[in-house]
Amino acid sequence: MGATRDTLILVTATVSDTQKPAQAGFCVSGITDFADGISAIDTHHIRPALDASYLLIRNGRAAFVDTGTALAVPHLLAALDQKKLSAEAVDWIFLTHIHLDHAGGAGALLKHLPNARVLVHPKGAPHLVDPTKLIQATIGVYGADFFAATYGEILPIPADRLQVSEDGVPLLWVDRTYQCLHTPGHALHHYVLWDPLARAVFAGDNFGVSYRQLDVSGRAFVMPATTPSHFDPSEMHRSIDRIAALQPAAVYLTHYGQVTEIERLAQDLHRGVDAYVAIADRHPAGFDRTVRMCAELFEWLSGELDAHGDQSDVKTRHEVLDLDIDLNVQGLISWATRTGTTKLSGT
Ligand SMILES: [Zn+2]
């Protein structure tokens, strides 16, 4: 039986074993359980509660949505153990997109899962079979030292264990029909996984980034993820609208966890995309462009956090936001360079 919209919202997270939540729906590490057999697994990428994989369980069968990096594999296998599921019970690894903080562990994980297949956007499939370019591109964004310390060994995925997603085509798994919806904007190789019965969307990075430590009275703060190198503001606006039009009860973000109040967050994301692009417009060139854009984006986000009611100090905000600010500015510059314009091409 699937949860209704109301039950999904009302079931606050239960936290496995001895892990104690800092607040409802949030745990610093480990596994956070939601309704409908959905659990968030902290992949422990960079810092706690930054990067999630989701474990879906239906009638004793299992699927992962995104995997984190190759270093996350022990955490994912431990989560199966904790749920008393064998590796043979896993049917799918759904990869919302192939950025390596979400897909980097798929090849290594697959070696442990004899029955699993990987579902990936057709534009992403070749780069999982041969991840050379993907690794090079990631090193280009993060640097070689950071990559070596935080991503682990990226293993290729055999082509015969890959299946490509088809936009909107029903996908039956166990007792439930899912849909992959192709949603560019954050990346060309991005889909979101839609569970109509649970009214749940697994959004990857296409419904923004929302860290639980910025929640105020249970209300989420969300910001767009304009990471290099395929950010496209018009497509991102369309994808946000496509997700919101489903009227989901909850959206599950890889960064990080479950968010509700989807209509409000969609409006916040639209405003954020426009604000990010306006910042790029104001800094079209110059040797210190990146520094200026990062400073302005921090100021804009700080103003939004003030309006949200967040009372954290400047140092804390930098700790939470600076990684995203750096990536988002890189993505804005990449987009402006690629398109030869910093003008928003319409919403
Ligand atoms: Zn991404």
Image: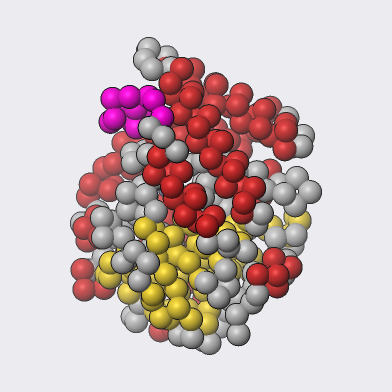
- Classify residue 121 by image quadrant: bottom left
How is the rendered protein coloured?
secondary structure
Is 340 magenta? The answer is yes
Q: Residue at x 46, y 43 (%)?
A: 237
Which of 17 and 59 lies nearest the eye of the viewer? 59
Which of 14 and 207 lies nearest the eye of the viewer? 207
Where is residue 210 shown, x and y percent of the image? Answer: 60, 47
Q: Residue at x 31, y 66 (%)?
A: 166
Q: Residue at x 55, y 35 (%)?
A: 272
Q: Is residue 273 above or below residue 152?
A: above
Is 347 magenta? The answer is no
Where is residue 182 shown, x and y percent of the image? Answer: 36, 58
Q: Is residue 284 above or below residue 47?
A: above
Q: Decide if residue 180 is on the left or right side of residue 251.
A: left
Q: Residue at x 75, y 59 (%)?
A: 24
Q: Is residue 325 above or below residue 167?
A: above
- Classify residue 288 by image quadrant: top left
User: Which corner quadrant holds the N terminus?
Assistant: bottom right
Q: Decide if residue 272 is on the left or right side of residue 316.
A: left
| Range drawn in magenta | 333-344
